């Protein structure tokens, strides 16, 4: 029986590799080799792989200029993306096998395929963690919706490593639920490749696990961070200072088409109230996040998930920079809402949820297409989903805590 089971898994693995290889080749043949793109991945892939190809520092100005020429055919002009590495060096560990080819179109096709299936795997895990169990037909609808929904599709097309953070979080929460604490902590460390996505999440999860005495999460996180950072120092001793310098200079590096927090978009970009209003708004959101972290320190799983979902939403209002490609993280509060509606509406919930998915799919793409300026999305594309989910999350608070949570 054991040998039969092993061969079944081998067969599944071989079939999966054939599928991934075939899909990667199709994307390469009909898309990436014909339509240049994937700029978000290019600056990570080229700059990072340069370390392996020639031993040069990925954060150096010389490497960045060559990356700019790869995008524009010339060095970048003021206001354009400077194609800097802009990530912790250990991000390279995620995609280093793609450095075995210098054909970026092929590397991007493989990366897009991997990110698509990572997104779908993360979606399934998030639904499981949220205790949402849709009918089988709705599963297939939701998987198709997940691949086509504007923030997810945009992340895949651009090659955004945000999808790696999403699937690492989904795996970490799944492991946490199953009490595999060391693995949960180690996976949590991987979310730090984009600190602007996890800077609130990390202290919250470590805080909650500390109150429950689940120190395995801390051990897994500490060991994984030590390995990631230590290996990075061996490769590039100055990587940390180089990375911090890049973060400080990110407004110039990212280009004029990037936006700051959602609070900045509302108070400055739309209302024109200026920096003081943004500072006050960010401060209030931060205080509220701390308040809910304190109240949720003893929460059971239902209350923990509610607070985690809220933290993921508030991150976009507080982070110095956000992006619509980061919105895959919002699947946790979205599926938490779906689970709540299913519990309250019973069999009728399935069609209500299909309606919500349809509205999100059509609505988000419509906002993007109606407001697009040249090749760039506008700030209006950032607002609908997080504002909707913030309102829903606040409305759901009493239900989440009543259904298995515990208030201090």
Image (cartoon, helix red, strand yellow):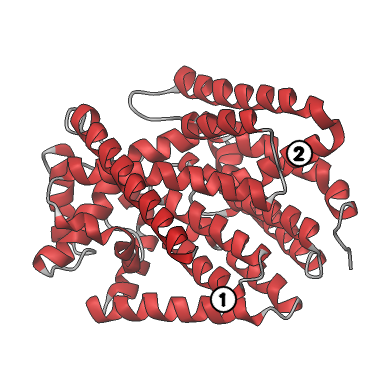
Distance from the alpha carbon under mark 2 to that under mark 1: 32 Å
Where's residue 236, x and y in %?
24, 76
Q: Nearer the viewer, residue 92 or 180?
A: 180
Circle nearer the viewer, 2 or 1: 1
At 86% from the left edge and 54% from the top edge, which residue is drawn? 401
Pick the front one: 326 or 184: 184
Up-down relation of residue 366 to residue 79 (above or below)? above
The reply to whether the C-beta atoms of the residues labelled 2 and 1 are less than 8 Å apart is no
Q: Is residue 314 left or right of residue 96?
A: right
Q: Position of residue 24 (x, y in %)?
A: 27, 39
Residue 282: in sight, yes or no?
Answer: yes
Q: Is residue 408 left or right of residue 77?
A: right
Residue 277 in view: no
- State the count of labels: 2
- The residue at 18%/46% (across/down) is 68
Residue hosting label 2: 392
Q: Residue at x 45, y 76 (%)?
A: 224
The C terminus appears in which quarter of the rendering?
Answer: bottom right
* Callout 1: SS: helix
Question: Which residue carries the number 1 mark?
Answer: 182
Decide if residue 144 is on the left or right side of residue 256. Answer: right
Q: Earlier in the sequence, mark 2 or mark 1?
A: 1
């Amino acid at each position: 029986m054991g040998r039969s089971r092993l061969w079944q898994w081998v067969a599944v693995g071989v079939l999966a590799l054939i599928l991934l290889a075939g899909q990667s080749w199709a994307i390469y043949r009909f898309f990436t080799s014909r339509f240049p793109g994937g700029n978000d991945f290019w600056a990570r892939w080229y700059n990072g792989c340069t370390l392996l190809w020639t031993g040069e520092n990925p954060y150096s100005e010389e490497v960045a200029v060559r990356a700019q020429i790869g995008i524009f055919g010339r060095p970048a002009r003021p206001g354009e993306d400077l194609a800097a590495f802009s990530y912790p060096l250990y991000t390279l560990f995620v995609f280093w096998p793609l450095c075995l080819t210098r054909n970026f179109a092929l590397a991007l096709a493989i990366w897009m395929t991997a990110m698509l299936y990572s997104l779908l795997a993360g979606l399934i895990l998030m639904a499981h963690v949220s205790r949402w169990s849709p009918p089988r037909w709705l599963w297939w609808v939701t998987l198709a919706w997940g691949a086509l929904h504007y923030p997810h599709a945009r992340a895949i097309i651009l090659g955004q490593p945000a999808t790696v953070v999403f699937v690492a979080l989904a795996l970490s929460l799944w492991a946490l639920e199953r009490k595999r604490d060391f693995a949960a902590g180690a996976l949590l460390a991987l979310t730090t490749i984009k600190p602007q996505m996890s800077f609130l999440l990390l202290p919250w999860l470590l805080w909650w696990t500390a109150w429950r005495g689940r120190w395995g999460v801390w051990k897994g996180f500490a060991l994984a961070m030590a390995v990631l950072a230590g290996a990075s120092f061996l490769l590039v001793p100055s990587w940390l200072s180089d990375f911090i310098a890049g973060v400080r200079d990110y407004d110039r590096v990212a280009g004029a088409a990037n936006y700051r927090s959602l609070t900045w978009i509302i108070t400055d970009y739309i209302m024109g109230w200026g920096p003081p209003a943004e500072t006050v708004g960010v401060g209030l959101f931060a205080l509220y996040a701390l308040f809910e972290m304190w109240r949720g320190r003893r929460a059971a799983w239902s209350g923990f998930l509610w607070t985690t979902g809220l933290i993921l939403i508030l991150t976009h209002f507080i982070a110095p920079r956000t992006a619509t490609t980061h919105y895959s993280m919002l699947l946790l509060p979205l599926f938490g809402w779906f689970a709540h509606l299913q519990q309250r509406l019973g069999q009728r919930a399935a069609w209500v949820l299909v309606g919500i998915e349809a509205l999100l799919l059509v609505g988000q793409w419509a906002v993007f297409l109606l407001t697009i300026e040249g090749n760039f999305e506008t700030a209006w594309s950032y607002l609908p989903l997080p504002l909707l989910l913030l309102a829903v999350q606040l409305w759901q608070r009493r239900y989440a805590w009543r259904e298995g949570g515990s208030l201090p």
